[in-house]
Amino acid sequence: MSYVKLTRDQLAARIAKDIHDGAYVNLGIGMPTLVANHLPAGREIILQSENGILGMGPAPTSDAEDFDLINAGKQPVTLLRGGSYFHSADSFAMMRAGHLDIAVLGAFQVAANGDLANWHTGGKDDIPAVGGAMDLAVGAKQTWVMMEHLTRSGESKLVERCTYPLTGVGCVSRIYTDLAVIDVTAQGFKLVECVAGLSLAELNSLSNVSIAP
Amino acid sequence: MIDKIVSSIADALADVCDGATVMIGGFGGAGMPNELIDGLIAQGAGELTIVANNAGNAEFGLAALLKAGMVRKVICSFPRQADSYVFDALYRAGKIELELVPQGNLSERIRAAGAGIGGFFTKVGFGTDLAKGKEVREINGEMYVLEAPIHADYALIKAEQGDRWGNLTYRMAARNFGPVMAMAAKTTIASVHEIVLLGQLDPEAVVTPGIFVQRVVKIARSATVASGYKAA
């Protein structure tokens, strides 16, 4: 059988579909930021930005950019009606105490026990930078991962045990990849769905870990 | 009479000594007190420990301070940026010490210092390299890490409006670390775009009450520019 991987935008739309009306959500820098472009119409979803914004809106037109109003990736954004500003400690209190419903984060690796590695490859010349990743991973009510299933060299990013330095222990509840949606359960990875034309046996063989039906 | 307004950036920074710990507000370019940092470079104190979220962009502001060789150690959450090449080179050459701190631990450790808290337990970082060697404790069945407050000799922050009592307002997301850093430093120096008369700030809108601020200096109003911006 043949299958087609989801594009980044299709993957972002797939994740957005699962975000409930009224959810408070933080989208990590990089690929997760795309989810904001696909939030379903008719749902009020409030985006939080770690630098002190609740109710973050889309990017402004280029003539309306204001660099006092930027997202975590330092790109200009807007504020929705009803939005608010606050200082960094309040912003991180929102994450750290479980006030946020969902954090969507990128990942280098996710392990079968829910361990997440996304901040550092551990390489000697790699400048480490963690930002808010550890706070989000541990603090949000649910931590979802958005990533490509395989690395560029074809290795699975789903692993039995993370080999990269950890961001958080047992913190991931669900993984969305360009091949499948997978829950992390007490028994390990469990398939929710995969792209059309891809069998669980093929997915398991690509992943090099066991994903239960 | 209380008058915290100082007439120049040079006067505001005159007593910064070698070896001081200096907090610098800002997230990317927003709230980054570049004028005060330029004043610190001109002032010339060395062997500084800098507490900030990032470690500078291109060769202005914090990056210029690093490039001038005035910084011994940086405590921050996200040094790596699209254009953080000054820090990157110093770090790789072993010429600067880095204490990498998750951003929420950074802001909370600063807040703790400002609130007289001797330390706190947090779940963030447990089981990771950034908690290595730190005391851990099980609380209600979950594992927590003990984190210490971060105090500073000076905080350099950028606010929007200020008065002679040191009351401050901020603009949009330029607020970020300003309010907690103001609380945590022995001497907080705020640059503002507008100095107003006592009573002109709406008391309901004051974000940093004047007790946390020692010096206020007016700078020219200018638009914040992009920094560390990496096109998606």
Image (cartoon, helix red, strand yellow):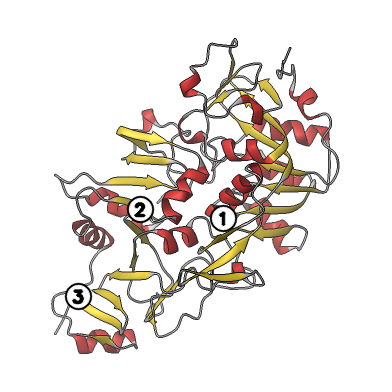
Does mark 1 fall on the same chain as mark 2? no
The label on residue A100 is 2
For label 2, the crowd category at 10 Å Cα-Cα, with few meaning under 14, some 14 to 19 and many 20 or more, is many
Q: Which residue has dot 3 on it?
A: A192
Q: Looking at the image, is mark 3 or mark 1 nearer the viewer?
A: 1
Residue behind mark 1? B105
Query: Could you say where residue B63 lies in the image, as x and y percent from the top left?
Result: 67, 45
Whole-angstrom CA distance, mark 3 to mark 1, is: 35 Å
* Residues behind callouts 3 and 1 on a single chain: no
Q: Nearer the viewer, mark 2 or mark 3?
A: 2
Q: Residue at x 43, y 58 (%)?
A: A136
Whole-percent x and y of residue A135? 48, 58
Q: Secondary structure at mark 3?
A: strand
> Where B21 sits versus B38, above or below?
below
Q: CA distance from mark 2 to mark 1?
A: 17 Å
Q: Is residue A200 left or right of residue A173?
A: left
**Residue placed at 30% from the left, 32% from the top?**
A82
The crowding category of the residue bearing disc 3, from other C-alpha atoms within 10 Å (few below 14, some 14 to 19, many at least 20), is some
Subunit bearing disc 1: B
Whole-percent x, y for residue B73 in the image: 74, 54
